[in-house]
Image (cartoon, grey):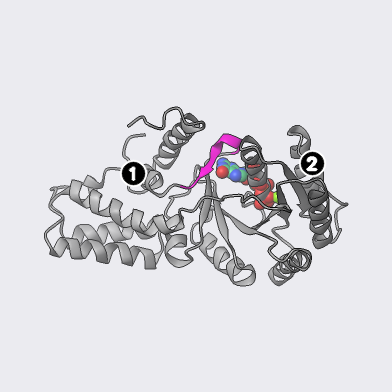
Amino acid sequence: MFGKKNEPGTEKKQGFVTRLRAKLNRGDSWLTYDLANLAPGGNIDEEVLEDLEAELVMADVGVEATERIISGLQKSLARKELKDVASLKQGLRTALIEILEPVEAPLIIPDMAGPFVILMVGVNGAGKTTTIGKMARKLQDDGHSVMLAAGDTFRAAAVEQLQAWGQRNSVPVIAQQAGADPAAVVFDAYEAARSRKIDVLLADTAGRLQNQQGLMDELSKIKRVLARHCEDAPHEIMLVLDASQGQNAMVQAEKFHEALGLTGITVTKLDGSAKGGILLAIAHKLNIPVRFIGIGESADDMQAFEAADYVDALLSNES
Ligand SMILES: Nc1nc2c(ncn2[C@@H]2O[C@H](COP(=O)(O)OP(=O)(O)O)[C@@H](O)[C@H]2O)c(=O)[nH]1
Ligand SMILES: [Mg+2]
């Protein structure tokens, strides 16, 4: 059981899972209050499943993923497999893991000649710049060299935020003045990373422009300019989503995916008012790998997404 004890990072991960559980178990969080409350007599029937359905929808799971979960449980009920609260919880756990497992796919940096380019996208305030800082730390811990590109040139403060982070952590940051062409900044950074033999280039981008089409056009241009010079770049287009935005985050994900073709998602702010169900909605509907989940502002508050740990944290009723 403790076979992994001496693996580097295991202790950190355990701490993270414990904190994730505690954060998701705060006050009004869904399902973390005893499922038994849904079935006061301990007996599971159609009505209990209807109440559970309402809970799931309220927890941001989304109508479609909820239907999938409930119809599976209804079948189990008909087969008389849901005798009590414990078997309901077990059935629910299995259903949630089945939805989430396909998107459990950690970000792996391959050995390659040029830099592995990660383009970070998402609306303003989602946590892009913070996630870049956390990822840079993790990548360095794993022995990779890292460079940052200040591709959010819309606000001067955004460039400064990234530069400050880079300075504190001795990570080079390629930046130009506010208002510069983001595609030019990112391409400059790509050239610099290539000549300095940097392993990973993390490119920040703006989350808000005059309008949404403008933003998508700008991001598409960055992608195009990179691809012109290196066929496979960007190697990852990662959407950062704020979990406390609920279904609105889902709408954002669909728009970004349509415009850019996402290859990964990081979900932040699961420590806030988030109910945690948004990951199920994303997994069911978009089937895009969820790379990391974030539960706070510091570097240790982000870990690779693991379906079973996540479901156990959601269903746990100890805090
Ligand atoms: N509580 C919490 N705050 C976060 C998390 N990730 C980012 N933030 C905060 O959210 C705010 C916006 O983050 P920022 O990285 O600037 O967003 P950006 O506009 O997408 O670059 C900052 O105050 C961050 O510290 C998280 O996982 N939990
Ligand atoms: Mg930012």
The x and y percentages for residue 109 are 61, 49
The x and y percentages for residue 27 are 39, 40
- Quadrant for the N terminus in the image: top left
Q: Work out which residue is located at the far top of the displayed protein and give it.
A: 6
Q: Residue at x 14, y 57 (%)?
A: 81
Residue 154 can be seen, yes or no: no
Membership of 65 in magenta stretch: no
Residue 68 can be seen, yes or no: yes
Inspect the image, locate mark 1, and give the three-letter code of the amino acid beneath it: Thr
Membership of 303 in magenta stretch: yes
Where is mark 1, residue-wise? 32
Residue 47 vertical placement versus 303 (above, below): below
Judged by depth in the image, the label closer to the viewer, 2 or 1, is 2
Q: Are marks 2 and 1 in contact (CB under 8 Å)?
A: no
Inspect the image, locate mark 2, and give the three-letter code of the amino acid beneath it: Pro
The x and y percentages for residue 107 are 56, 51
Q: Residue at x 74, y 69 (%)?
A: 224
Helix, strand or loop at label 2? It is loop
- Left or right: where 53 falls relative to 211: left
The magenta segment is: 297-305
- Left or right: where 37 falls relative to 224: left
Q: Residue at x 64, y 50 (%)?
A: 111
Q: Residues within 10 Å of mark 1 (few under 14, many from 20)?
A: many
- Left or right: where 49 falls relative to 266: left
Residue 49 vertical placement versus 17 (above, below): below
Ligand 1: quadrant of the figure: top right
- Quadrant for the C terminus in the image: top left
The answer to whether the residue bearing label 2 lies less than 8 angstroms from the nearest atom of ligand 2 is no
Where is mark 2, residue-wise? 172
